[in-house]
Amino acid sequence: MLLNQFLLLSAILFCIGVYGVIVRRNGVLVLMSIEIILNAVNINLVVFSTYWGIGGQVFALFIISIAAAEVGVGLAIVLLIYRNRRSIDIDELDELKG
Amino acid sequence: MWFFRNVWIVPALMALSAVLILFFGKRLPRKGSEIGLLFVGLSLVFSLLTAGAWLGWVDDDEGPTQGAAATFSEVDENCSNLADEARAGGELDLDATEAGDHGGDETAAGAASTTVTGGPDATAGPDVVAPASGVPPGEGESASAAVAAAEEGEEYSSTRPIVSCVAWFGSGDTSISIGTMVDGPSVLMLVVVTIISLLVHVFSTDYVKGDRRYTHYFAFLSLFTASMLFFVLSENTLQMIVGWELVGVCSFALIGHWWEEKPNSDAALKAFITNRVGDVGLLVGVIILFFAAGKSFSILDINIAAAEGAINQGVLLIASLCLIAAVMSKSGQFILHTWLPDAMAGPTPVSALIHAATMVVAGIYMVARLYPVFWEGLSIPGSSINALAMVGAVTALFGALLAFVQKDIKKVLAYSTVSQLGFMVTSLGIGAWTAAMFHLFTHAFFKATLFLGAGSLSHACHHSFNMVDDMGGLRKIMPKTFWTYLIATGALAGIFPLSGFWSKDEILAGTGSFPGTSGANGEYHLMLIMLLLAAFCTAAYMTRTIWYAFYGEFRGHGHPHESGPAITIPLIILATLGAIAGLANLPFNLGPMEKYRFEHFVEPVGLYFPSLSHADFHPVLAVFSVAVGLSGIAAAYFYYWKGAFAPLQGLSERNKAAAWGKNVLVNKYYFDWLYTTVIVGFVKGPLARAANWANQHVLDGVVNGVGRGSAATGKWVYDNVDQKVVDGAVNTSAAASGGAGGVLRLIQTGRVQQYAALFFVAAAVLTGVFVVLVG
Amino acid sequence: MTGLVALLAQVGTEAQVDTTFDVPANVVFAVTAVFMIVAALRVVTTKNIVHAALWLIIVLGGVGVQYLLLQAEFVAVTQFLVYLGAIVVLILFGVMLTRAPLGVSTDLDNDLKPLGIGAGLVLAVVMGFALIQSFGADQLDFRAYDSALGLDDPQTAAAGRTGAVADGIFGQYLIPFEMISVLLLAALIGAIVLARRD
């Protein structure tokens, strides 16, 4: 197997995830897109662990656990937004407007 | 032996009890309290059996008690490096720790290698004398005591601790174990904690009956006991920290048991946060000792290395000062004691548990556990003042004074605990180790009696603790509470022959300052004076509580009644123990009973402990200390009952100096004010304002100055350079930046996703540049 | 599920025998990759939130399959357990708790589509270029990898790669591991604080 077939797959998934993060309005869907991005990165780490030893797999595991934490906190934030505004459209969150 | 190896069952039982209560408590007929009672009862039985086994173990003449190898024959492998080496080579080899000894105080190190390699080996005894005689005067006494012990040869036996451990985790080449260490102090604490805990459990079944978090309360009571047991059985300092923090967390939960009321949750937070201050000290101290003892957390390693002088005295001094900070917070010593009286916000049985057997005793126990560190670090023997003794003596006296102005009976008892803990710390500071442990032992009983008695009083008086306004004349109505309270007060005041007399007298004798005492480790004159004053105050303020609670007219409302058996029976048991516990360490030669003496089985002897000398019983001092206690009682008696010292009545209303003094006491020496208003206020107020001022004046001044400078330059340029050329350029650039701003404004939409998109594109572009340039 | 894992593990083992030309592994890879890409595209384009979550399952499962192909069994199992078992369920809960429309809804996307496509394409081009230029037709070499882990030595081979992962986590990376446990605790408390009603 080629190294690149995995890396390219991971790159494509990453770009799809980026597209989702930018385009989706619903907060939960944005979180799903972030999960795709994290998984793409994880594939990279595991692929390179065949190159440079076990560290890549260890960090992939770390990222999986951090992703779990991130989804937990992220969903809590989404819930809070929903409770405050009765909507989770990220579009409407434009208080950062200059 | 089985008991020593399996003593971990005791804390495990209590932890299991906490879990079971949490999971099944609510469904049981008595809401989980029966589980707690059952398990704490089992723990008590196990502890008593262990204590019995320990008596036999100490007295076991069969076993070889000579030499390091034999001393550590019951220490598991990999628990302690030094014990492992001792077993392998028959002697201690402290090279490893000496290597970690930075700087190397030559006298200490020199004394170390000789004392240690010779060690308790009787044959090596004479060799030790020569180098030991070169030790400076401060060290002389301990060194010669060690030599004397070594020269005694056959009669010299050393306590053999039983250490069991399993690997906890390892990182790199350091492996951390977890396990139990059974020796005198831990067996003592095991028994004290389980007895008090059992009685507090029984008491609580009635006292918090009908509470909305009854089950939760019992679960935490069990967990609290489990944490303390875990702490006292710790085999290494890291494990001690875990137990220490667990105790802190449980006390936080229990002090804030009625957290719906703001003062209660504030008190819990205060206890927790004040303890954090000391925990920093504990952490730093433990880390210092870890490296000083050759990268080992093992208590045995640390104690051996410290006792045998393998660690630089300066390092030990710093470590012990850090640990003193921890003791100050945990054991409510002066300046960090402020949380302890506030902790009265918790249910009364919890206060009894905290004050008698768990939380606050943890600090004392920690010092007792790592005693060689303090012994060597503070140069306790032969000295007349040191930090530990000073902290203790100041606490003993000032805590006792504070107790006079409290209206709340529990607060009086809280300050009394502060003061008594001061006695214990002083005792440790002056080298009277056994006296400190003995006082801990007796104090646990009579202080628990007093607290539970106060609980019984408030149970009768509509849950008020205000003895000045809501109590009075309860002597006839609550005879059982009255008599137990009276006995405990007598014990606390040090009246012969109650337990407090024996332990307090031992501490006073241990100062070695009273004319004619002999056998003490130093001459702590100041400590003796302060402790005697504190003892006088103790007797007086306790008499004051008796006056307010039990004599005079009933000032509350309703009809008080004696509490039920679940409350009075623990009181009677505790008062009995408080009366007779002093017999455990009578300062006389008991002949055949000698081996059951407290001192004999609690105090470790030998390699991992400094050789303490014990102050002899001094009849004049004993009479004098009882006289001091009686005069305190008499003073309070005449003042309250007889209205004597009439000019003194209401003095604080008439005399400015007295009013000022009372004010200081009522405001607890302004420590809370110091912490909240001065320190926090300073950070929040002046410091923040100063920062703001600096920002406004200094920084803005610089900015303004630069601005003015550039303005001047600009004017000069305007005046001197061809105005029109520059003008044109300026106008153009202004227009350009205005236009750019207008364009950039469009992307400043406040929409997060657009920012994300820009971020990703920018990252991609940068990556592209990087790839093109590098690749 | 277990059958599939065993089969894929077997495929992975065969890949170890011949690293240059391994048709079965490549076929599995290609099929899975196509599924994953299609599913990922559906996640970001579908008009039904619940469907998006279901498509996400395929993507995450596919990632697990890729781990198996890369002979990272432990990571693969963790992927299945944590992602499929926990995170997807959590996301479905999120969908329900926020009362998202369960059927088709037309307003799931905003008006940034051109920007999104642009960013995605730019990233894809840059990364693709960089990868092809850097790694070209490099082969995965599991034998060199195994010898680096000490797996060619029968003494240490018994623990397998999972053993090597364990050594990594509890040896060299112990402190990051502990930090993550603290982080998880913080996230736990944070999530409770954020989500509770009071």
Image (cartoon, rainbow, N blue to C red):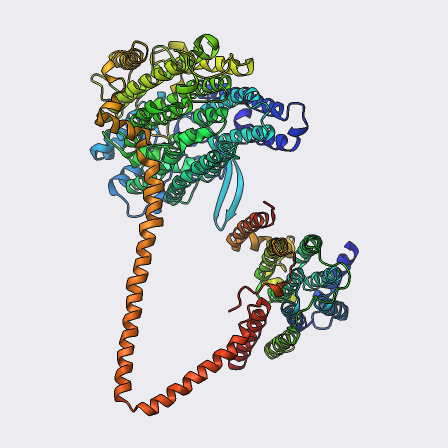
* Residue C149, horizontal then vertical, whole percent: 59, 60
Q: From the viewer's perspective, is residue B201 above or below residue B641? A: below
Compare residues A97 and C98 and report the one nearer the observer.
Answer: A97
In this rendering, position of residue B15 left or right of residue B538: right
Q: Quadrant of residue A66?
A: bottom right
Compare residues B181 and B584 and report the one nearer the observer.
Answer: B584
- Res. B570 in view: yes
- Res. B600 in view: no
Q: From the viewer's perspective, is residue B646 above or below residue C161? A: above
Compare residues B132 and B417 and report the one nearer the observer.
Answer: B417
Q: Quadrant of residue B5?
A: top right
Q: How many numbered discs sit on the rendered protein?
A: 0
Q: From the viewer's perspective, is residue A73 above or below residue B711? A: above
The extreme top residue here reads B476
Q: Quadrant of residue B730?
A: bottom left
> Where does the C terminus of chain B fall, quadrant-wise?
bottom right
* Residue B14, horizontal then vertical, whole percent: 57, 29
* Residue B759, horizontal then vertical, whole percent: 55, 71
* Residue C43, horizontal then vertical, whole percent: 71, 65
Compare residues B162 and B263 and report the one nearer the observer.
Answer: B263
Residue drawn at point x = 64 percent, y = 57 percent: C161
Q: From the viewer's perspective, is residue C74 above or below residue B641? A: below
